[in-house]
Image: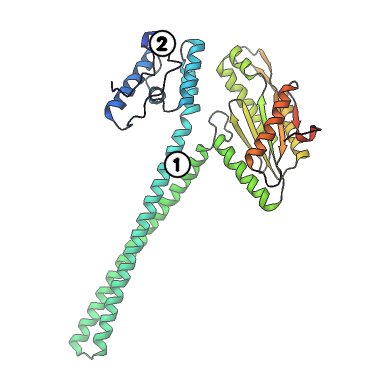
Amino acid sequence: MPANLKLQLQPAADQSCAAAAAPPAVPDKRDPHYTLALAQLACEQIKALSLPADPPSFELWYAYAGNHNPALNQAINERLKQGGRLSVADADRLYERFLSPLVAIDSLNNTGNKIGDEVRALVAMIELAVCSADEYQDNLNDATRKLDNGVDGDALRAIVTSLCAATAKAARENGELQSRLKISLQEIGYLQKDLEAARAQSLTDPLTRLGNRMCFDQSLEAAVAAAQKRGEPVSLLLGDIDHFKKFNDSYGHLVGDDVLRLVARALKNAIKGQDIAARYGGEEFAVILPNTGAVQARIVAENIRSAVRAKELVKRSTGASLGRITISIGAAAWRDGEAPQALIERADKCLYMAKRDGRDRVVAETDVESWVV
């Protein structure tokens, strides 16, 4: 094993991972010795935990061994400290949560590169067409000069024959260019669709199918810029599922995932038009409300809170009730000239007050008599 690779996994017999493993020194990720060492560690952990030796499992543990995604390593370590091992379902959720978005980004980059290749091919075709046109123009100019100097019958026939050959060649090359251009434009059309799909995937949280944090950051920045330009209001809601850790600890992560999906559905049903719902992180959600002032934003927030509160979580296997889910929400309206981060901070303060004052409630800036910035 190379000296710069620090072991991320415990021995197979221990069936646990090093919770405080230090990240490796910056390696050459193309070094065969380094990559083979990571592959060996990944295979050993798959075997130790009796997980399927499929590509997602290998990618998961390869990423862990190389500490490519610190958040992934932390999640695996915490899960193993709790239960001592990872189930297939646990591994699937971890892969979906931490690696699927990276796959989408890779797809986005690959599609973009292919479009670049097609555009370069188009430029080459255009350059070829320009050269062909220049050559044909030279033939015409040469024929004109000869005719201006006077020619006999044989010379005239030679000029006409030469022009006919040049014209046929130009027509043939133009036909070939048109065919190649049509195929290339069609391919670019397909690639544009792939690019749009990959971009949408890279901005989507795989578990809830809402926008992810990247989507939220981009959307809020765009919404604030539009509000500044048009002189329109924009509001932000930040919500946090109450006692979410209790659901995970009491019923397991599968139930926790169901809770997240249920809340996501409630958000989707409560918003409309240009409103944007996103998973802000963990059990936190965000809703951007363009062209919406503080009063209307509070109404939307209350509708979301009521919709979540009305849902009852039922265990699929037995039909037994696991209780109701509640959510606390903070609402803030953008102030002219402020940065998106300032709006986030004020909405987060409102959320903190909602949690502090008993949860399952909405707190907006309009509810606070004395607001300290």
Give the secondary structure at mark 2: loop
Q: Is residue 144 visible?
A: yes
| Label 2 Cα crowd, 10 Å radius (few <14 / some 14-19 / many 20+) | some
Q: Earlier in the sequence, mark 2 or mark 1?
A: 2
Look at 65% across and 17% down and name the residue there. Answer: 314
Q: Is residue 342 left or right of residue 13?
A: right
Residue named by callout 2: 15
- Amino acid type of disc 1? Leu
The residue positioned farthest toward the left in the image shown: 154
The residue positioned farthest toward the right in the image shown: 369
Number of numbered discs visible in the structure rendering: 2
| Location of residue 166 in the rendering, given as x and y in whole percent from the top left corner | 26, 73
- Name the quadrant containing residue 262: top right
| Location of residue 231 in the rendering, given as x and y in whole percent from the top left corner | 71, 51
- Amino acid type of disc 2? Gln
| Location of residue 339 in the rendering, given as x and y in whole percent from the top left corner | 64, 43
| Label 1 Cα crowd, 10 Å radius (few <14 / some 14-19 / many 20+) | many
* Spatial CA span between label 2 and label 1: 36 Å
Q: Is residue 259 left or right of residue 121?
A: right
Which quadrant does the N terminus fall into?
top left
Give the secondary structure at mark 1: helix
Image depth: mark 2 or mark 1 in front: 2
Q: Is residue 13 above or below residue 181?
A: above
| Location of residue 150 in the rendering, given as x and y in whole percent from the top left corner | 23, 91
Q: Which mark is residue 108?
A: 1
Which quadrant does the C terminus fall into?
top right
